[in-house]
Image (tube, rainbow, N blue to C red):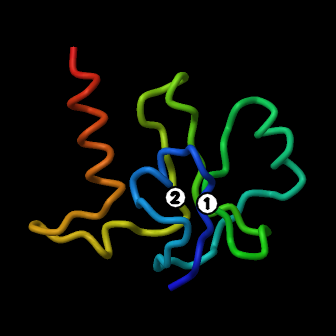
Amino acid sequence: GYKAILKDGTIARSAYGTKEVIERHRHRYEVNPMYIKELEAKGLIFSGRSPDGQLMEIAELPKNVHPFFLGTQYHPEFLAHPLNPHPLFTAFIKACIQNKK
């Protein structure tokens, strides 16, 4: 497992209800550090970062842009069980219900 620090006011922080999480993954692909500032300037939020701030673990769009647009570097399905879903899956289902048309 790898630790991620979650940014206040984000979908990820709200879903987990905590500032730090530990998730299982492998870093085969990463966000190129050269583009982080440019991506953030265009509205992407890196809501989860490694403790040293070098690896982007979670990316999302603000809720005012999209009700639930979130991607992770890790595998939340590894910790999901039928009677104990992963917090991100629960948050996704809640967003679907709230935005049902």
Q: Is residue 61 above or below residue 99?
A: below
Label at residue 58: none
Q: Residue 8 location, x and y as percent?
A: 60, 51
* 76 sits left or right of 70 in the view: left
* Marks 1/2: CA–CA distance: 9 Å
Looking at numbered disc 2 in the image, what kind of residue is underneath it?
Thr
Q: Residue at x 41, y 60 (%)?
A: 16
- Of the image marks 1 and 2, the number of the one nearer the N terminus: 1
Rendered view: 16 above or below 38? below
- Give the residue at x 39% y 53%: 15
The answer to which image quadrant residue 87 occupies is bottom left
The residue under the point 73% across, 57% down is: 31
Q: Quadrant of the C terminus?
A: top left
Q: Amino acid at mark 1?
A: Gly
Secondary element under disc 2, as helix, strand or loop, is: strand
Q: Which residue is mark 2?
A: 72
The percent position of residue 25, horizontal first and vertical second, equals: 51, 77
> Which image quadrant for residue 97?
top left
Q: Is residue 23 above or below residue 56?
A: below
Q: Nearer the viewer, residue 77 or 22?
A: 22
Tag 1 near tag 2, CB within 8 Å: yes
Left or right position of 87 against 70: left
41 versus 71 height, above or below: above
Horizontal arrangement in the rendering, residue 62 relative to residue 75 (left or right) = right
Q: Which residue is mark 1?
A: 48
Mark 1, mark 2: which one is toward the viewer? 1
